[in-house]
Image (cartoon, rainbow, N blue to C red):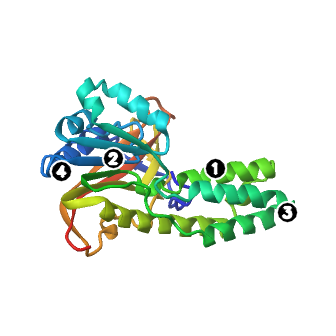
């Protein structure tokens, strides 16, 4: 859950348990897109553990597959888990990079600014001002690709900045982290940065696409925590919004044409005993063609 997610509406609510379809449906739609385009180059942005990415099939079809994530070790673990044959492994290229290009820059600025004040409120204002003033960089991925895959990346772009900022603040002001978390000024600055990151990310997808290529874009605009009740149902206090909208198609501007779409549930750590809590994500996915640049 991102730090700027809205608080859920008053509950509790009851709902019937559902099966997680995320891995199966993601792979199905990505493969359908892959089979439609010229088998040149593919890139997977924010690939992570590649759980929902059909890595073996992409490596078999495309001449080159670029995997991006900010965590290189996670990518290596994903590749090892795929148990690719040597020819398929040779097609993979790893690019470790923060897709926003600004997280490290801002953290360095925080490190320089925080020691200059002993007042948490003043520090919060300094941090918020630095975030407001920071321009979002272009996506640090080069080249053109016939298939661009961005699976549940959009809502996570500012995740590292939010959490690592918390760490910086808490190190400077022990036991004062709630002041930062509850600050409307800081929340507004993070929200503004998240929206700028999202807009630049969508632009970046267009810039990566080869003529005639396709984009696979999925996201979970909302999620909720679910607790298993004694009668076998799930109970939730309400839904958290993850993006600026509850419909991913709101990110589709006139440059795009929707080729295919899907929607499914993603259950993380499904509760198996009464009182246990899991997470339920509403995933929406689009396959896009760019026809106006």
Q: Residue at x 36, y 30 (%)?
A: 79
State the CA–CA distance, disc 2 to disc 1: 24 Å
Crowding around mark 4 (Cα neighbors within 10 Å: few <14, some 14 to 19, many 20+) is: many
Crowding around mark 2 (Cα neighbors within 10 Å: few <14, some 14 to 19, many 20+) is: many
Residue 43 shows in the view: yes
Q: Residue at x 62, y 65 (%)?
A: 187
Crowding around mark 3 (Cα neighbors within 10 Å: few <14, some 14 to 19, many 20+) is: few
**CB atoms of marks 2 and 1 within 8 Å:** no
Quadrant for the C terminus in the image: bottom left
Q: Position of residue 85 (x, y in %)?
A: 25, 24
Counting residues from the start of the chain, the first of labels 2 and 1 encountered is 2
Q: How many marks?
A: 4
Q: Nearer the viewer, mark 4 or mark 3?
A: 4
State the CA–CA distance, disc 1 to disc 3: 20 Å
Q: Residue at x 66, y 55 (%)?
A: 107
Q: Residue furthest right?
A: 118
Residue 164's label in the rendered image is 1
- Secondary structure under tag 2 reads strand
Residue 44's label in the rendered image is 2
Q: Position of residue 97 (x, y in %)?
A: 48, 48
Counting residues from the start of the chain, the first of labels 2 and 3 encountered is 2
Counting residues from the start of the chain, the first of labels 2 and 4 encountered is 4
Residue 285 shows in the view: no
State the CA–CA distance, disc 4 to disc 3: 53 Å
Counting residues from the start of the chain, the first of labels 1 and 3 encountered is 3
Is residue 271 positioned above or below 251 on the image?
A: above
Q: Nearer the viewer, mark 2 or mark 4?
A: 2
Counting residues from the start of the chain, the first of labels 4 and 3 encountered is 4
State the CA–CA distance, disc 2 to disc 4: 13 Å
Residue pointed to by mark 3: 119
Residue pointed to by mark 4: 33
State the CA–CA distance, disc 1 to disc 4: 35 Å
């Amino acid at each position: 859950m991102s730090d700027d997610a809205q608080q859920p509406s008053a509950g509790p609510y009851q709902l019937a348990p559902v099966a997680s379809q995320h891995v199966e449906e993601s792979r199905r739609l990505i493969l359908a897109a892959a089979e439609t385009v010229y088998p040149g180059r593919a890139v997977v942005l924010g690939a992570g553990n590649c759980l929902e990415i059909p890595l073996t099939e992409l490596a078999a079809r495309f001449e080159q597959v670029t995997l991006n994530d900010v965590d290189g070790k996670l990518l290596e673990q994903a590749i090892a888990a795929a148990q690719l044959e040597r020819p398929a492994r040779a097609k993979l290229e790893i690019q470790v990079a923060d897709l926003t290009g600004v997280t490290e820059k801002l953290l360095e600025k925080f490190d320089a600014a925080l020691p200059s004040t002993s007042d948490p409120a003043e520090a919060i204002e300094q941090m918020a001002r630095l975030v407001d003033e920071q321009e979002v960089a272009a996506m640090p991925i080069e080249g053109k690709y016939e298939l661009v895959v961005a699976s549940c990346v959009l809502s996570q772009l500012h995740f590292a900045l939010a959490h690592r900022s918390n760490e910086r603040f808490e190190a400077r002001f022990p036991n004062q982290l709630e002041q930062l978390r509850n600050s409307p000024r800081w929340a507004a600055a993070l929200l503004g940065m998240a929206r700028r990151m999202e807009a630049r990310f969508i632009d970046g997808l267009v810039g990566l696409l080869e003529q005639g290529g396709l984009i696979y874009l999925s996201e979970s605009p909302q999620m909720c925590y679910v607790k298993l009740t004694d009668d076998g149902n799930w109970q939730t206090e309400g839904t958290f919004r993850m993006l600026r909208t509850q419909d991913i198609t709101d990110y589709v501007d006139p440059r795009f044409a929707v080729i295919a779409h899907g929607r499914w549930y993603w259950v993380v750590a499904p509760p198996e005993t009464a009182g246990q809590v899991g997470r339920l994500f509403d995933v929406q996915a689009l396959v896009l063609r760019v026809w106006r640049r």
